Amino acid sequence: MNQLVQRAYNFNAGPSALPLAVLEKAQQELIDFRGTGMSIMELSHRSAAYEEVHNQAIALLKELLSIPEDYEVLFLQGGASLQFSMIPMNFLTPEQKAGYIMTGSWSEKAFSEAKLFGNPYHVASTKDSQYRGIPQFDELQYNATDAYVHLTSNNTIYGTQWKEFPQIGDIPLIADMSSDILSKPIDVSKFALIYAGAQKNLGPSGVTVVIIRKDMIEKANSSIPTMFKYSTHSKNNSLYNTPPTFGIYMLGEVLNWVKGIGGIYEISKRNEEKAKLIYNAIDQSHGFYSGHAELGSRSLMNITFRLKDEELEKKFLEEAKNEGFIGVNGHRSVGGCRASTYNAVPYETCKAFSDFMLQFQNKNE
């Protein structure tokens, strides 16, 4: 790659940073993919060359997340937002209830979609505290007859994250892990279904990963349109229709990168170190910066904070932009500041931002 190219300090919440090594490999293979004389974007999704890419990506995800044998990995489209509808469409009937744990805007959206198909209710909610934390296990009030219980593992807008997941017996537990999948080890066997948009930790936008227990596929509603059935995609290895081939290729290369640097335990260690740099800048500022999330619920993926007044905040964001820090504005619905430190964001980027925070405080106290 041209060494004169200056890479941005990319803190975008999604689509987000991709590993430089992955981008460079994709650049090398873009015109002629492994001797085919075509780009990966030009290959037939029925070709042997693409099928190898597709199946390797599935195998790598199973390996890195230690996914048990009784689960399927699907590559779908429509983002997590389509899963908000697809899940109740498959598993919730008009007479059934489903529990939703409310921890932010994305769980609100998922809940709203479920109301179109059955009777969802709030298992617990932290809305009254402006979604500053994750509910305690003893706050969760669910029913043994629920079709499922749904949670959002990491909340990009409010900067909160589940550190441990609840045990809810035989009730299927479903999780939206769009913004922290592959960022730390998880016990997949606790979940009946995990879904995630790829555009934060797994690859570019356009691919949605679904990890689903096989018995869930078998018991799903069969009286829905073909493309909304998980069974359609399971039976066809996610190749029922044309998949987002380039996105899946990139996802596979990101997985290769994770494996190459030491796997999920190494990536988890790096994520803790990166987040600590910025949280330390907040905690040691004596109130100049104030974090939104409660201490025990802080996200390692999305660090949200405010300054003491809007004018100072505006100045901070403007100077940050001038220094090359991209995407540090808080979500438009809540304002403030946010640094998204996903897997591919380098340590050096987080160190540069924490240094900038300190310098800005010293100049403006």
Image: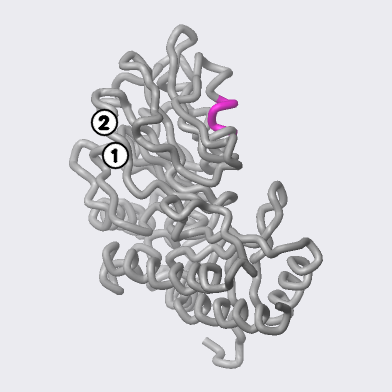
Which residue lies most toward the right here?
Answer: 311
Which residue lies most toward the left here?
Answer: 69
Residue at 59% x, 50% y: name it. 157
Judge left or right: residue 173 versus residue 126.
Answer: left
Q: Amino acid at mark 1?
A: Glu
> Which one is nearer the viewer's eye here, 328 or 176?
328
Bounds of the magenta segment: 109-113
Say what secondary structure mark 1 lies in.
Answer: strand
Q: Which residue lies under the disc numbered 1?
A: 72
Question: Does the residue at mark 2 contact the one at mark 1 (Cβ under 8 Å)?
Answer: yes
Residue at 60% x, 80% y: name it. 358
> Which one is nearer the viewer's eye here, 246 or 363?
363
Residue 73 point in image, percent of width and height: 32, 43
Q: Place residue 52 in its image quadrant.
A: bottom left
Residue at 40% x, 17% y: name it. 221
> Which one is nearer the viewer's eye here, 289 or 44?
289
Q: CA distance from mark 2 to mark 1?
A: 6 Å
| Number of marks drawn | 2
Q: Mark 2 or mark 1: which comes first in sequence?
A: 1
Residue 178 point in image, percent of width and height: 47, 48
Q: Which residue lies under the disc numbered 2?
A: 214
Say what secondary structure mark 2 lies in.
Answer: helix
Q: Quadrant of the C terminus?
A: bottom right
**10 Å neighbourhood of mark 2: few (<14), some, or many (≥20)?**
some
Residue 357 point in image, percent of width and height: 61, 77
